[in-house]
């Protein structure tokens, strides 16, 4: 079992409160996933010509931040670092994916959690409330966000096995369920050049979408292909640079609730997460149909 | 009348009060406010109480109900009225998956839609749904009646035993060993009574079609073995 949540703002009203709202949604999903938690925030676009890479390191302090700044400056010329607990958002010149690969090669103590123009991913072992407090998500702005609380079934409880998974620029996926053909798909995707950090099944789903998008699919095409190629149980919430999508497998035994108002679209494993949002009591609420793609924005 | 505001009070307090009612207030009524999608509200009641929940509820609401009437003015999460024995559960909105699962008796009324696996393994409950039901509804349904005023999703009545299914709208497809059957006088009568009991008298019994077991699957037949 896991808990997943997603929040997509339709106008500027709620954007300053994105982090606060997502945190309260995520905490409601603690019973579904007490092992680890993570969030993907779409916010604060990198300057023209730059990208953002989020990295995690178990032991960051003032001193190591300074040496990180120096060593990254040496690699990229000049970078700006924004620390959030044990994660750092690095704004780099040029393509964020290339920069992420370079960071992985030159700084083996850092773990890249996301790369893109707008995405930032923070994730850690522990109870959702401890994780969101650690990252001080209250008051963090943004346009849309995904969150995940994990009860591990397929692979180990570690920071790197925590969701969300991002395998491509600004693409992110959270998953409740389990895939049964992930080893086969991972081998196929690796031969297509997709990089994986773990043996986790959900990371394969993210990698699969990245691969389809790189082949020229739009998100809807990629999700249609996923319905054909992914075997197992899943409710996915997916974020792109400016879009948000939800998909359930054809059996649809993993729960999902969608709700929409004039100001926001929200998805959660259970209504009690959505109940935290302003105007939830008057929202249009429905259960996403099996094997049906729902998208907003993008 | 007792009121529980779940913004301030614990679910355990609510359920304990309901469990104590046979000796303290057997015919009493209870109103629950601010349920906010919380789980396991009003479960295990065994007294003819009247319980009204104002808002959306989470998993397993009104499970194992006996005698009580539970009104939910909102939507219900998965597992509504699971294993109900008697009494009534009435939802004004929609119900999520497997509502009325394994229920032995009583009446479950969903005014909106019910999701997948509605009435799975039902064992005598009557279920009346004002809207549609999702896929795999009445899977392995043993006995009882399911009345659907809207449409039914895929694999209706898969591996059904002796439950009787009535659908007014379309059926995406029937599950294994489920077939359409003739509507006799007694079936029209039965549907009329169930619609009346559910307060859905704007539907006519004659608009419904009946589905049930072909009785080929649950008798051992070597051709059904793989």
Image: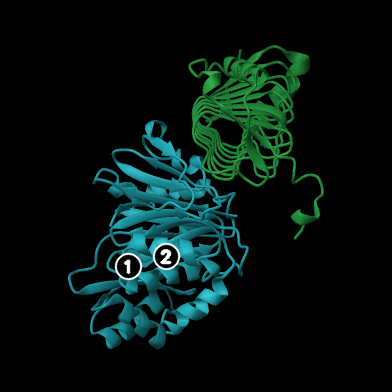
- Rendered residue at 58%/41% (across/down): B97
> Helix or strand or loop: what does disc 2 sit on?
helix
Say which quarter of the image contains residue A200. Answer: bottom right
Residue annotated with mark 2: A225
Q: Earlier in the sequence, mark 1 or mark 2?
A: 1
Q: Which color was chain A given?
A: cyan
Q: Residue A213's spot in the image, x, y percent?
A: 34, 70
Q: Mark 1 to mark 2: distance in Å? A: 9 Å
Residue A220 in the image, given as x and y percentages of width and height:
35, 59
Residue B219 falls left or right of residue B191: right
User: Is residue B141 depicted above or below B126 in this figure?
Assistant: below
Chain hosting mark 1: A
Residue at the image point whose x is 49% and y is 57% from the top: A148
Disc 2 packing (10 Å; few <14; some 14–19; many ≥20): some
Check whether the beta carbons of the residues at disc 1 and disc 2 lie within 8 A of each other.
yes
Residue farthest to the left? A48
Which coloring applies here? by chain
Q: Which residue is mark 1?
A: A217
Q: Quadrant of the C terminus of chain A?
A: bottom left
Instruction: Evaluate whether residue B74 shows in this view.
Output: no
Instruction: Note whether A56 is above or below B9 in the view shown.
Output: below
Task: Chain letter for green, please.
Answer: B
Mark 1 element type? loop
């Amino acid at each position: 079992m896991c808990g997943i949540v997603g929040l997509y703002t339709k106008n500027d009203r709620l954007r300053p409160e994105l982090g606060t709202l997502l945190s309260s949604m995520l905490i409601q999903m603690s019973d579904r996933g007490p092992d680890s938690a993570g969030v993907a925030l779409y916010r604060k676009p990198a300057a023209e010509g730059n990208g953002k890479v989020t990295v995690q390191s178990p032991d960051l302090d003032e001193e190591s931040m300074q040496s990180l700044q120096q060593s990254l400056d040496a690699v990229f010329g000049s970078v700006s670092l924004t620390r959030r607990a044990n994660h750092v958002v690095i704004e780099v010149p040029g393509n964020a994916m290339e920069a992420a690969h370079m960071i992985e090669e030159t700084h083996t103590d850092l773990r890249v959690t996301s790369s893109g123009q707008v995405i930032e991913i923070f994730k850690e072992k522990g109870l959702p409330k401890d994780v969101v407090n650690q990252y001080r998500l209250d008051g963090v702005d943004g346009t849309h966000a995904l969150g995940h609380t994990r009860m591990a079934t397929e692979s180990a409880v570690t920071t790197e096995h925590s969701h969300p998974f991002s395998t491509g620029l600004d693409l992110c996926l959270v998953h409740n369920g389990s895939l049964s053909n992930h080893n086969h798909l991972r081998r196929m995707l690796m031969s297509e050049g997709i990089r994986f950090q773990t043996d986790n099944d959900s990371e394969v789903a993210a990698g699969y979408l990245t691969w389809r998008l790189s082949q020229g699919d739009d998100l809807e095409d990629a999700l249609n292909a996923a319905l054909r190629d992914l075997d197992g149980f899943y409710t996915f919430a997916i974020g792109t640079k400016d879009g948000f999508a939800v998909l359930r497998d054809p059996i649809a035994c993993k729960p999902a609730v969608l709700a929409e108002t004039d100001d926001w679209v929200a998805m959660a494993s259970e209504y009690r997460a959505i109940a935290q949002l302003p105007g939830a009591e008057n929202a249009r609420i429905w259960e996403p149909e099996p094997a049906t793609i729902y998208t907003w924005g993008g | 009348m007792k009121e529980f505001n779940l913004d301030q009070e614990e679910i355990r307090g609510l359920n304990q009060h309901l469990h104590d009612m046979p000796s303290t207030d057997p015919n009493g009524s209870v109103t629950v406010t601010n349920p906010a999608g919380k789980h396991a509200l009003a479960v295990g009641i065994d007294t003819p109480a009247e319980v009204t929940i104002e808002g959306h509820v989470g998993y397993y609401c009104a499970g194992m109900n006996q005698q009580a009437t539970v009104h939910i003015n909102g939507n219900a999460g998965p597992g509504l009225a699971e294993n109900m024995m008697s009494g009534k559960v009435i939802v004004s909105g929609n119900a999520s998956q497997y509502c009325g699962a394994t229920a032995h008796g009583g009446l479950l009324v969903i005014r909106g839609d019910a999701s997948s696996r509605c009435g799975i393994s039902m064992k005598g409950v009557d279920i009346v749904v004002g809207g549609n039901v999702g896929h795999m509804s009445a899977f392995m349904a043993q006995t009882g009646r399911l009345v659907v005023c809207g449409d039914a999703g895929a694999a209706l009545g898969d591996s059904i035993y002796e439950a009787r299914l009535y659908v007014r709208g379309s059926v995406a497809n029937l599950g294994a060993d489920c077939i359409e059957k003739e509507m006799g006088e007694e079936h029209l009568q039965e549907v009329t009574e169930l619609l009346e009991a559910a307060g859905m008298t704007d539907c006519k019994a004659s608009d419904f079609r009946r589905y049930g077991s072909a009785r080929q699957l649950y008798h051992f037949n070597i051709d059904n073995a793989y």
